[in-house]
């Protein structure tokens, strides 16, 4: 813990701390807010902060984007390559895939929300829980004895 | 140095946007702010040298995602109801998780360290071999389309599955609504 007071250490890790603050803001929205659309937005915030964190691992100080210079025949100019530092391209590739998968899950979640609104006429988690408890109570009153106990 | 300052400013703006999303109750404003959040994160991706990720995030996060969210609030309710429970327990959960994550970053190499394990493993290999193997100037494209092409194939399968799922969930929306109206009439 004494590391956190060291200025040089803090300068090297300030990015990580801020990414974690962002992640936790997203997590707070997911856990605290009851509106389902807002939960999806919180999930997106969390997801994007994880992406930023992951990409930041591939960053090299003084490096540039991993795109090579080309010669006049549109091939990679191998002589111009020497002495240029490039950031690690591998995290970028993985996060590109993750972004597209993320939008796929988001759209599926939003479609589920539309169906939930159709069935319950609300998109609020607490209201849905309330309605479901009512439904269980009704079922117990009607069929409880016939089924030999509470559902 | 200037890079670090830019990054910190962008991250501060991101945190402020996220906090505004927490406070906001009108969902339209929340959706617009999430678009702002995506664009700011795209800027941060540029300063992190991930230009491909930046334009994907700008197109997908600020574009498609915003459109989908707007469509959802058009089909549902545009205002959030205030929660009945207190924010105390969620706050504690978030605080504990955050503390655990900060503890996890203490052992990480400093930001931008050229000798970090991530930079001396297979990363340089891809950079060194791309000119001869693939001869495409953008290394990210080379890895995405060739070295790790199966990942991209799997991603396409995921998107396809999600698309079918959305279609199945939403198909017959209008038909069910008309049935409902007939029942009421």
Image: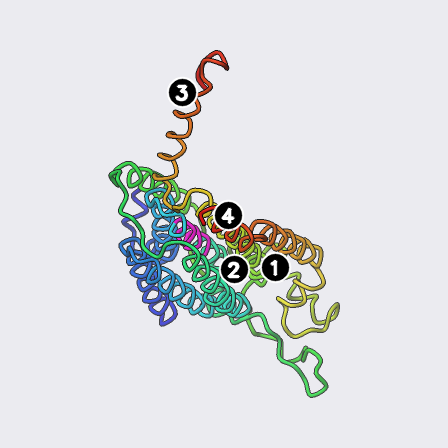
Q: Which mark is residue A112?
A: 4
Between discs 3 and 4, the one toward the N terminus: 4
- The tally of labels here is 4
Task: Check the image and report above or below for A144 versus B118.
Answer: above
Q: Give me the residue at 26% from left, 38% from top.
A: B85
Q: Give me the residue at 39% from left, 67% from top.
A: B40
Helix, strand or loop at label 1? It is: helix
Closer to the eye: label 3 or 2: 3
Closer to the eye: label 3 or 1: 3
Whether residues under marks 1 and 2 lie with C-beta atoms below 8 angstroms apart, the answer is yes
Write down the residue under mark 1.
Answer: B123
Q: Which mark is residue A141?
A: 3
Q: Which mark is residue A58?
A: 2
Which range of residues does the magenta coloring cover?
A: A39-48
Task: Check the image and report above or below for A42 versus A129.
Answer: below
Q: Position of residue B56 (x, y in %)?
A: 53, 67
Label 3 to label 1, Cα distance in Å? 65 Å
Whether residues under marks 2 and 4 lie with C-beta atoms below 8 angstroms apart, the answer is no
Label 2 to label 4, Cα distance in Å? 36 Å
Q: Are marks 3 and 1 on the same chain?
A: no
Tag 4, which chain?
A
Q: Are marks 3 and 4 on the same chain?
A: yes
């Amino acid at each position: 813990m004494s590391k956190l007071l060291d200025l040089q250490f803090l300068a090297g890790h300030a990015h990580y701390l801020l990414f974690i603050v962002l992640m936790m803001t997203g997590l707070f929205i997911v856990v605290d807010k009851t509106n389902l659309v807002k939960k999806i937005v919180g999930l997106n915030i969390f997801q994007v902060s994880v992406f930023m964190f992951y990409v930041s691992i591939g960053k090299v100080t003084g490096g540039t984007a991993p795109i090579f210079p080309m010669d006049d025949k549109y091939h990679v100019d191998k002589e111009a390559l020497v002495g240029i530092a490039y950031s690690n391209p591998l995290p970028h590739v993985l996060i590109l895939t993750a972004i597209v998968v993320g939008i796929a899950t988001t759209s599926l979640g939003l479609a589920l929300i539309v169906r939930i609104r159709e069935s319950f006429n609300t998109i609020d988690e607490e209201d849905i829980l309330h309605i479901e408890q009512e439904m269980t109570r009704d079922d117990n009153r009607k069929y409880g004895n016939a089924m030999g106990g509470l559902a | 140095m200037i890079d670090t300052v830019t990054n910190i400013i962008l991250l501060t703006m991101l945190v402020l946007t996220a906090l505004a999303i927490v406070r906001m109750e009108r969902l339209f404003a929340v959706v617009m702010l999430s678009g702002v959040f995506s664009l700011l994160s795209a800027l941060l991706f540029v300063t992190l040298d991930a230009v491909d990720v930046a334009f994907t995030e700008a197109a997908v996060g600020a574009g498609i995602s915003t459109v989908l969210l707007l469509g959802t609030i058009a089909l549902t309710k545009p205002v959030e109801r205030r929660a009945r429970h207190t924010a105390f327990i969620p706050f504690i959960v978030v605080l504990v998780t955050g503390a655990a994550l900060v503890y996890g970053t203490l052992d990480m190499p400093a930001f931008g360290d050229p000798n970090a394990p991530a930079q001396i493993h297979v990363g340089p290999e891809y950079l060194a071999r791309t000119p001869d193997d693939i001869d495409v100037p953008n290394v990210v494209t080379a890895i995405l389309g060739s070295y790790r092409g199966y990942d991209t194939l799997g991603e396409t399968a995921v998107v396809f599955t999600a698309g079918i799922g959305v279609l199945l969930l939403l198909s017959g929306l209008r038909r069910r609504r008309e049935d409902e109206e007939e029942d009421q009439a």
